[in-house]
Each structure stands twice: as C-alpha cells, then as structure tokens.
Amino acid sequence: MKTFFNVEDLGNLNDALAEAKEIKNNRFGYQELGKNKTLLMIFFNNSLRTRLSTQKAAMNLGVNVIVLDVNAGAWKLETERGVIMDGDKSEHLLEAIPVMGSYCDIIGIRSFAGLSDRDYDYAETIVNQFVKYSGRPVFAMETSTVHPLQAFADLFTIEEYKQTTRPKVVLSWAPHCKSLPQAVPNSFAQWMNAADVDFVITHPEGYELDPKFAGNAKIEYNQKKAFDNADFIYAKNWSCPGVTNPADYGKIINSDPSWTVDTEHMSWTNNGYFMHCLPVRRGLIVTDDVIESDHSLVIPEAANREISAEVVIKRMLESL
Ligand SMILES: CCC[C@H](NC(C)=O)C(=O)O
Ligand SMILES: NC(=O)OP(=O)(O)O
C-alpha cells in the first residue's frame, strides 16, 4: 500500500475490519516488521489523538518514530512554484520533501484545508507533493479533504458496538464558533457508504458535502426525522463545502443552536450511541449530559485510533 487516503486503499473492507480486530487482540505481535524502519510524522497543524495514537501504533510494530511540527522549529516553507523567495519563508517544499523522505521509510502527514481556495484544497495540493516527491509511502493524518485513520476507527467502533446486522448511522452537522474543515465528515461519509450500514446525513441547507464523498447517502434536512430510530449518532461541525454556493466555501453560514445534540435529540433515536472524533466543544456540538452518558463512545472511539493506525502502518511495512 503506497498511499492511504481513501477507503478503497485498504482493499476489501471486511478483511480490513477483521485485521483490525485481530491486531487489537495482538497489537505487539508484529514487531519484526518494524525493525530498523522509521516513520516520519509531519504536522502542519495541531493534534492530540492522531499524534499520540499513531506514534503508539508505530511503536507497537517496532518502528522508530520522528515527529516534525513544521511550524515549530523547521524553516517556514514556501509551497508555491515560480515565486521569488524574498519574504519570510526560508525553504521551499520541493527541497524539504525529498530531504525529509531521505530520513524515513514511511510518511504520515497532517495538513488541514486553508478554507479560502476550494480548488486548491480539494486538489490536495500540499499532500500530493509529498506523494510525488518524497519517494515514500504516504498516509493521511487529516489532509485538506480526508481523515481516513479517523473514519476507519469510527467504523471499527460501530462494528464493535452495533446491536443489529445493519445499524442506522447518522452523520449530523452541529454548530461551531470557528470555520472547520470538511475532512472528517467527508471520510466518515465515504467509509459509511462503503460499509453495511443504513447511512443518513443531516445538516442545514447549504452544507452539502462534496458528491465525491456524500455518494448516494440519504440527505435529510430535518434533524429530528434523521435521528428517528438511529443506532449511532456521529456529530461533527464543518464549514460550508461550497457545493451549492462556491462563494460560501469555508464560511459559517448557519449557527442555529437547535442543531446542538442534547438528551432530547438522543431520545429520538433507538437508544442510540453518541460518537464524535474529538476535540469537541461542549455546549456547541453536544451537551455535557450526552457526551458523559453511558451511550457516549467518544473514548473507546479515540482509543481505536491506535488500532486503525496500526493496520495501516503494518500494511505499508509489508509493502516496502
Ligand atoms: C479531528 C478534527 C480536527 C479539526 N478540528 C479542529 C478543532 O480544528 C477538524 O474539525 O477537522
Ligand atoms: N480526532 C483527531 O484526529 O484528533 P486530533 O486532531 O487531536 O489528532
């Protein structure tokens, strides 16, 4: 596996979920694979779960880990070609990338969407240069448009907790005070569409996800109807994806607090579980009672990030 950005990169999804279950019970069983191998984790943005779980996963596999926070210690990087570098950027990405690639065997990268230029973000301009110029396998640790390690862990968690063969899973928008990327909902939708679940997306008008990710999912603009009889509620904020109105890309076009998930919302479900990728802003996305309830899965969901990362790194090691 040379890149991990989309669900299809794992091949058969049921096989990948079975491998995750096996690794969860035997996470130290493959340490020979990582002997004398190095993972370079590159962060252009903050992280808690991804930073810790991916390092842990690599260490489980016997892999050496280097973590680089590009904006804290490295040279400020120019990402555009054809510019005269007489500003505050000392190094160009096109030198930095192959240099970084020379120190490692596998690269993980986090580079969030800028949320100002939709074409630039949705072309994955930054990350695709790492794929092209590093000479190494590259996996996403949340890029402009995807967060597959999160979605893999989310689906694995649903498989662990589902009470029926084909559960109803609802991706619900919720309000936020900042413009957030679409990467998490994009990947969640992509992976749910590939899984054996009854998938519904609910959000105010104008927040339609890119069709590349929303696929054939049912879109329900009435949140209460969407929650009806749901088994899993996956709450997340995202800024306007610019699908219905490109001029609104990256903007907050709705702040309606009635979309905040509270106990009444959860009463509409089939005694459903609450999920969120974290970090979460209580009082905006979800109330304290819901996220602290015995049907909140946010902690086991975060713990499963170690497992999704270990499957991906293991597969990349096996293909070196
Ligand atoms: C895992 C989530 C990362 C990011 N969240 C924030 C707060 O920037 C997002 O919404 O994409
Ligand atoms: N869910 C997730 O990726 O969390 P971090 O942004 O803290 O890594």
Image (spheres, helix red, strand yellow):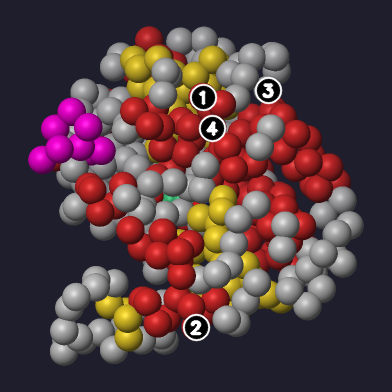
Q: Residue at x 55, y 69 (%)?
A: 135
In the rendered image of this protein, does residue 85 appear above or below residue 51? below
Q: Residues at badges 4 and 3 in contact (C-beta under 8 Å)?
A: no
- Three-letter code, disc 1: Asn
Mark 1 vs mark 2: give the one in front: 2
Q: Which residue is mark 4?
A: 191
Q: Which residue is mark 2?
A: 99
| Residue 319 x %, y % | 72, 57
Q: Secondary structure at mark 2?
A: helix
Q: CA distance from mark 2 to mark 3?
A: 45 Å
Q: Which residues are magenta?
A: 240-247
Mark 2 vs mark 4: give the one in front: 2
First-in-chain label (4 vs 3) = 3
| Residue 277 x %, y % | 50, 44
Q: CA distance from mark 1 to mark 4?
A: 5 Å
First-in-chain label (2 vs 4) = 2
Residue 246 inside the magenta-drawn segment: yes
Give the prevailing secondary structure in the magenta stretch. loop
Q: Secondary structure at mark 3?
A: loop
Q: Residue at x 69, y 32 (%)?
A: 12
